[in-house]
Amino acid sequence: MRLGDSSSKFAILGTLSLHPASGYDIKQFVESSIGHFWNESYGSIYPILKKLAHAGLIQPEKGSRGGRERVVYAITPKGEKELREWLVLPPRAEPARSEILLKLFFAQRTPVSTSMAQVQEKKLAEERNLAAYTRIREGLEQEHARHPELPYWLITLSYGRHRSQAIVEWCNETLAALAKLQKISKQKGGPK
Amino acid sequence: MRLGDSSSKFAILGTLSLHPASGYDIKQFVESSIGHFWNESYGSIYPILKKLAHAGLIQPEKGSRGGRERVVYAITPKGEKELREWLVLPPRAEPARSEILLKLFFAQRTPVSTSMAQVQEKKLAEERNLAAYTRIREGLEQEHARHPELPYWLITLSYGRHRSQAIVEWCNETLAALAKLQKISKQKGGPK
DNA sequence: TTTGGCATGTAATCCGTTACATGATTAG
DNA sequence: CTAATCATGTAACGGATTACATGCCAAA
């Protein structure tokens, strides 16, 4: 049973470093707190939990809530150590793969209106993100005002805000550019 | 020999829709033109080329340049059709996975200076990107001033510019926030 | 009683990178 | 001569998603 250095492992370890949790809890937590820059599926969580326990980095707790099947894990000192060692390593850059940009790059062979629809959809998605970030930030600042980790949480949120804001601006610029293209192609192909 | 709907397939098909090319050429092209938002390795390119040829979406050409081993592929009408069909489909959002944000989120258990170094490195990387985008844009506008695809190329470049610019700003903001944290922790833990 | 959320897990599969293997050609 | 670049390909491996399978409990 090998366990590599995948960052999934550390996302799970990091979550358990905040509070003991079951696989299900971890999934919930990831979605609600770091969901805008990270994701985990049950398909990785449960196998990794087993391996982490096997390696002594986490430990299953006894307290079974209610009688419902439920395994809660807590991080061990050894796990904390490995987590800290990983945290200080230089982060690897994520490989860039943007499907919308790939499509736009080759979009000259498709109707301009299709590209505009794609960009418009992207814009809406990013605006939804922006609204969510604002809500989350307000919630955090009220409920965890003095929490020692708050500054770090706000930092990752702010990343999302900057990024989404920039993409919305790009969408607007791009929609204008595409509209221009559309006008030109209509002049040529349209009614004489 | 199955061939799924992975976007790699269409990145390759798209490249061949611009001009016939060998696997080696494709790799070069991807790096130099869409490298800031896409990447392909030889390990996928060559097997996919075989499968695309097998499916009749591309065709190997005869002209062997120089005598050096070299297989140049050209897209077929059938390939063009499949490409166009894919281009107009709604692009899927890329799953978010940012290792640097993951590390920052849990960074409270590490020295502030480490986080600052990580953010500083990120800032430099994005500034290098910005410089590259400017160079590429100037090159494109000079050498391909009237090329019909130019507007689309500029659109993808502009995305990179907006995004990198926003991240640099976030880096500055974050470095300031971290410096503040550092001052506070020094007051508490430092010399009385 | 039935729906939805809680809860865990496995198997199939896909997709892609890395490392390896090989060799020709060309520029210095 | 020799280093770099051109050029193609495979095998091993790893990492992650998806779909599937299962079943309890609480609330409507």
Image (cartoon, coloured by chain):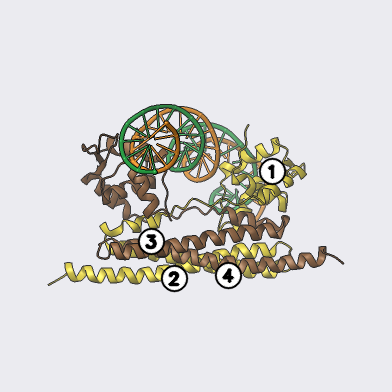
Chain colours: A brown, B yellow, C orange, D green
The chain letter under disc 2 is: B
Chain under callout 3: A
The Cα atoms of the two marked residues, 1 and 4, are separated by 34 Å
Mark number, residue B169: 2
Q: Secondary structure at mark 2?
A: helix
Tell me which amino acid carries mark 2.
Glu
- Classed neighbour count for the residue bearing mark 2: other residues with Cα under 10 Å, few (<14), some (14–19), many (≥20): some
Check chain identity for marks 2 and 1: say if they share one: yes
Residue contact between numbered discs 3 and 4, judged by CB atoms under 8 Å: no
Height in image: B126 above or below A43? Answer: below
Q: Which mark is residue B134?
A: 4
Contact check, label 2 and label 4, Cβ < 8 Å: no
Q: Which mark is first along the chain, 4 or 1? A: 1
Subunit ID for the residue under disc 1: B
Give the Cα separation between the discs numbered 3 and 2.
21 Å
The residue labelled by disc 1 is B70
Other-residue count near label 1 (Cα within 10 Å), few / some / many at <14 / 14–19 / ≥20: some
